[in-house]
Amino acid sequence: MNRALALLLISIAASLPALAGGSTGVRIKDITAVQGVRANQLVGYGLVVGLNGTGDSLRNSPFTQQSLQSMLDQMGVNIRTANPRTRNIAAVLVTADLPPFAGAGSRIDITVSSLGDASSLAGGSLVMTPLSGADGAVYAVGQGPVAVSGFGVQGRAESVSQNVPTTGRIPNGALVEREVAGALDDEGALVLELRNPDFGTAVRITDTINAFAKQRFGRPVAREQDLRSVSLQRPVDVSAARFLAEIGELYTEADGPARVVIDERTGTVVIGRDVQIQTVAVSHGSLTVRITEGAKVSQPEPFSDGETVVVPESFVTVNQEGANLAIMGGTNLETLVRGLNMMGLKPTGIIAILQAIKTSGALQAELVVQ
């Protein structure tokens, strides 16, 4: 296990007791969302112009040529009998998220992605593109210069690229033309949805809100529905925005399931705070087999009828490191991390041990393998 990862795990584990004892918890608005208050996805098809020879080849991208012809037809230019060969234009797909309660005239960010064989969108500008929702109505119109973080340079024998030059963003590139129907005050009973569903967290949120509401409004206003939602009854004389603002600033304690997440591809191991391991004896050793192929010359004895030939030669080395038994077990994350670090394991070894402990039934947590 590399030293940086070990120090990181130790520092996290060492900070947990202090957090549990002196922290005021988390704000309710950081762990919940109001049901129905969400963004809406928009999509549109457009053209990026002004590229420096890095756009679509019209022969390989017929939709780009058709779009170019249609755009010029609207401007009074007829090129249908011509055979354009420009490489300064690219067909793109434009996507955006329309925030809740976005009013007409406000601006939102958009993402532009190439559809054809363009090699880069750097230096291009998006032509006015309508952005539609799932209902087919146009809610915004995008236009502006495309900002690309990547680049690509290609020669006859070599090419160099960084990031993805065929995708870019336009900050504040879309103008909202239509508001989504509905308002916050039109909602009946307000419902808070937990980002990480848990029965304990839902009950704590309910108790925290009711303790505040008894002092502020003279009566409880919250009731837990299930592990995912908490219903609220807004007082008549308080607006929904003010009510949610006051509720959202309250602090509570968030809880979650004991879980271990491992990623065998990258060697990443994430252990939750409440993970516990019953006392077990663990032995982990590595067996290394190295095979080296070589060649040697076989020389016959003098005055013999033999021939000089080259014969293969193999060298096999087997090395097995010591695998002493270690007793490991703990009631908190700090003890568990200290036990793993004392064994001097690498991430692959930790993953193998955690999987084996889970199979033995000593790991009291959910094991998630990505």
Image (spheres, rainbow, N blue to C red):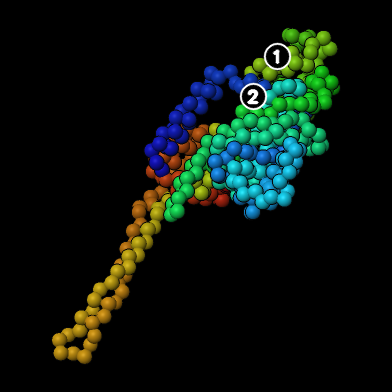
Give the answer, above or below, for where 46 lies relative to 185. Answer: below
Residue for point 25% across, 73% down: 296
Q: Position of residue 136 (x, y in %)?
A: 81, 37
Residue at mark 2:
30
User: Residue 246: which numbered mark, if any?
Assistant: 1
Depth order, front residue of 46/39: 46
Q: How many marks?
A: 2
Q: Quadrant of residue 72?
A: top right
Residue 186 got which mark? none
What's the amino acid at mark 1?
Answer: Glu
| SS for callout 2 | helix
Q: Residue 329 location, x and y as percent?
A: 49, 40
Compared with 64, 3 (above or below) is above
Look at the numbered disc 1 and give the secondary structure of its residue.
helix
Cα–Cα span, label 1 and label 2? 13 Å
Badge 2, how many Cα within 10 Å: few under 14, some, many 20+?
few
Q: Is residue 335 left or right of residue 129?
A: left
Badge 1 or badge 2: first in the primary sequence:
2
Measuring 61% from the left and 46% from the top, which residue is drawn there?
Answer: 86
Would residue 75 appear left or right of 21 to someone viewing this image? Answer: right
Q: Nearer the viewer, residue 340 or 221?
A: 221
Rendered image quadrant of residue 368: top right
